[in-house]
Each structure stands twice: as structure tokens, then as C-alpha cells.
Amino acid sequence: MLNHAECANGSEFVVLLDIKHDESADEVRQIPAIKQQLEGTRKRHRGPPPVFDGFGAVSRALAALSSMPETIKSPPERLTTAPHGEATFEREPVYMQGRYLKFKRGLSQTPWVLDGVRMGESSVEECIGDIALPFFRGSGYKFHTAGREDVDVRMLGNGRPFILEILDAKKAHLLQSDYDQIQKAVNAANEGAVEIRATKSSTKDYFAGLQAGADSKKKTYWYVSRSSDLTVQQETPIRVLHRRTLMTRPKIIHEAKCEVLNKHYMLLRLTTSAGTYVKEFVHGDRGRTNPNVASILVRLASDGHNEHVTYGCWITDSRYPGRLS
């Protein structure tokens, strides 16, 4: 199968050969440089463990010796066991990009698990990933987006940019017609809840751009507020304290436009820096966000109340990759 394969750095497909010989390994580990590295290894939290007793490391350690350590016998003893090897086949992730719209409230963006208990029946991630994965014959997937909306918030307008990262895909190169079929299947299976658009093959560069834009893009939000005798500042909101670090985050409200619908309702359009907790900007989150719409409106009326009714989000920044025309 690999007779005509060429070795190239940066290849999408990688074959890892791991050849071990336990009988030799015990002797190799007595070389001072190797022993010192093995004993000084600290626990690593991610990625494969470093290999200090591989062929290259041993060759360099032996070349640096002026005399052979007493722990290594010379001549060496005859070996009585054979080495054994393992081959692992890996490939770089395959990326699919698009935009999703969420029409159904109560649907989280990713699987929501709280204290080991699954909250909700599904998620946007699963609605898209579970259907797309078989087309690539991959082992799994990861879902990446340009920000996120709350579980009780719809995603409207042109939709939110997303990347579906397919792991160990056996079918890596799909035609545009295949992506069209994925889009059609996702939309049919999730009608009235989730819809995807502009689905196509993507790249590492787009993925990097999506991540880099998390703190630089602008988004436009809207909500409808109901008030009676209208009474209208950011520490981490109470509702996300279980998964976000407690800290104060400076955010910018670039623009705010208010339209009075009738004597009980108004429409407020906000353009904010990405990551702004917009609902908290509206109601103040018990004074954790300052200033806020409620504290501004209270100056205009002596009493009354402000009730948050509905909320939605459009991503309108033209600098996002994959902008819809």
C-alpha cells in the first residue's frame, strides 16, 4: 500500500512507527544523559509524552560520552528477545465551514452538562456534527464558532460562522455537491430548530481567522423590553459563574438605537464589542454590570419596572470570513 508513498514534512497523512525492545531499553536508560532526563521529567497535561530513549536521543547521548559507564556491560550480553513494533496511522483534521441559524429557544450551542447531568435533549453542535460526520467517515468531530448565544436566545440574520473539525477522516476530499447534500440533510432533520448555510470545504487559515476574530469583531444585538412607568453597569454574570472565571471585563458599546413600538414596548439595537454580556447590560445583573440600561432609564422615571421579554442576535461584521452577500 505504501510502496510508492513519499515522505514529506507537512503531509496531511502521517504513519507513526513505534519499535520497542524492552531488553535493550533497560541498558539504554543507564546512560547518564538519558537517565537524567527520564528522572527529571515533569508531568505533562496535554499531548504525547516526550521520548528520551529513542534512537536519535540515544545516538546523541553516546556520542557525547568520553568513556562507557560501569552500568553498561562491554561487551554487551547476548539478547534473548526480539523487538516488537506498532504502526499508527493519522491524518490532519478536515474542516467544513458554514453559518448556522437557530430558531428554537432552549437549544444550547454545545452539549450542556451540569454536575454530570445532561441538560436539554440536543444542541446545535450535535444537530450539525452527527449528520455531517458519516459523509467523511471520521472518528469524531469538534465544533468551533465565532462566539456563542445563550440557550434561550435565537441566532438570526445571516447566521453565526462555524467550523466543523473532522478527526481522522477516511474520506477527506468532498465535492461541493457533497457539502450541498450535508446542508440539505441537516436542514431537513432540524427544520424549525437549526439551519445551516454557505456550507463548503474549509482550511486551517479560515479556522485561525475565526479564532483570531473572537475579540475584534463587532456584533449587533436586539431585544424587546416591556415596561410599566418605565424604569429604565462587567463582573462575570451570575448565570455563567459555574463555567467562567470571576473577573471584570472591559467591553465597548459602540452604538445604541432605541425605537418606541408602543407605550409598553421598545426595540433597542446595540452594536457591541464581541463577548459583551448583553442581557446583563440591559438589566444590570444586580449591579455587577455598570452602567446598564436599567440604571440609565431609572433617571428618567421615579418608579416602575423593566421586564426583559425577547432577545436575538445578528452577526453583521463584514470582516468575518465567509460573509454572505
Image (cartoon, helix red, strand yellow):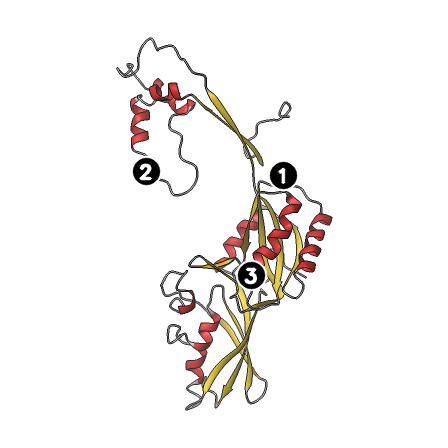
Q: Is residue 320 visible?
A: no
* Label 3: element kind: loop
> What's under tag 1, amino acid-wise?
Lys
How far is mark 3 from mark 1, CA to CA? Answer: 29 Å
Q: Is residue 53 visible?
A: yes
Q: Earlier in the sequence, mark 2 or mark 3?
A: 2
* Left or right: 251 as drawn, with respect to 309: left
The residue nearer to you, when weighing 317 against 203, is 203
The image shows a total of numbered marks equal to: 3
**Would you call the spot at circle 1 few (<14 residues within 10 Å), some (14-19), or many (20 or more)?**
some
* Number of the front mark, 2 or 3: 3
Which residue in the protein does label 3 denote?
121
* Label 2: element kind: loop
Q: Are the residues flagged by discs 2 and 3 in contact, CB closer than 8 Å?
A: no
Place of residue 91 in the rendered image (x, y in percent of width and height, measured from the top left): 57, 37
* Left or right: 41 as drawn, with respect to 264: left
- Write down the quadrant of residue 234 in the picture: bottom left
**Would you call the spot at circle 3 few (<14 residues within 10 Å), some (14-19), or many (20 or more)?**
few
Which residue in the protein does label 1 denote?
170
Residue at 50% across / 27% down in the picture?
A: 86
The residue nearer to you, when weighing 252 against 305, is 305
* Label 1: element kind: loop
Which residue in the protein does label 2 denote?
42
- Write down the quadrant of residue 100 in the picture: bottom right
